[in-house]
Amino acid sequence: MIVVLLGPPGAGKGTQGERIAASLGVPKIATGDVLRAAVKAGTPLGLEAKGFMDRGDLVPDAVILGMMKEALKAPEQAKGVVLDGVVRTVPQAEGLAAVLSELGRPLGAVMLFEIADDLLVSRLSGRTVCDCCQTPFTGRSPGDLHAECAKDPKGTLVRRKDDEPDAIRNRLHVYQRQTAPVVAWYRDHQANVVAIDAVGSLADVQARALGALGRS
Ligand code: AMP
């Protein structure tokens, strides 16, 4: 099953996406994670993306569409995939639809994580992430070792540049302007759009998300 996760930054798409992917037995692709790894490695993709990401702006559609095509054609995605933050503009939704139609694969569901803006700001401004495996945390400080990191050497917790107040404000604005119209686009194109209340404990939100997909 191919599942697209939509929702503002900080709504919990990454964390819930991992759980949904595990339940479906498919991988998860997060363009944000791929881009951050490219920035860290200093590749041409990373050098192109860095400025956009630091400001909280979107990376150009052409870059994302190339990544999307490559990822969906990979054999690991044959059973399905959870796409986290991969579709953020109407041209990206159109591009994904074209790739899926070329591959003869249906889009199973579009999950929309819904949450109020004031909660997002407090979640994002208190967040640290592992600079190695990208696991997010609240209540842990930048500079701490990520002792549970599965990678070797283990990562350190950092504050993402785009979790600074100005960038957060810009990301929420960018979401309203460029990504919110994607929800209407999917509804207009008869996609299976399911709205999930993203407020609550991880376990509660997970139960709602899996329930919406007919899983428990
Ligand atoms: P995320 O980790 O999903 O919050 O993404 C971090 C940043 O990566 C975003 O603020 C964008 O700059 C960039 N990014 C990730 N996915 C996309 C996408 N589908 N389209 C454009 N930019 C993206």
Image (cartoon, helix red, strand yellow):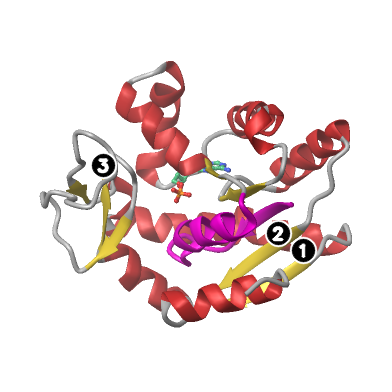
- Residue in view at x 75 percent, y 40 percent: 96
Q: Give the label, 1 or 3, closer to the camera.
A: 3
Q: In this view of the protein, which residue sits in the foreground, 175 or 22? A: 22
Q: Which residues are magenta?
A: 1-25
Q: CA distance from mark 2 to mark 3?
A: 32 Å
- The tag earlier along the polypeptide, 1 or 3, is 3
Q: In this view of the protein, which residue sits in the foreground, 2 or 112? A: 2
- Residue in view at x 46 percent, y 65 percent: 12
Residue at mark 1 = 184
Secondary structure under the numbered disc 2 in the rendered image = helix
Q: Residues within 10 Å of mark 3 (few under 14, many from 20)?
A: many
Residue 27 position in % (x across, y down) = 57, 45
Residue 85 position in % (x across, y down) = 56, 50
Magenta stretch: includes residue 18? yes
- Residue in view at x 71 percent, y 60 percent: 110
Q: Amino acid at mark 2?
A: Pro
Say left or right for 26 vs 144.
right
Q: CA distance from mark 2 to mark 1?
A: 5 Å
Magenta stretch: includes residue 19? yes
Q: Quadrant of the C terminus?
A: bottom right
Residue at mark 2 = 181
Secondary structure under the numbered disc 1 in the rendered image = helix
- The label shown at residue 131 is 3
Q: Amino acid at mark 3?
A: Asp
- Residue in view at x 45 percent, y 74 percent: 117
Count of numbered labels shown in the rendering: 3
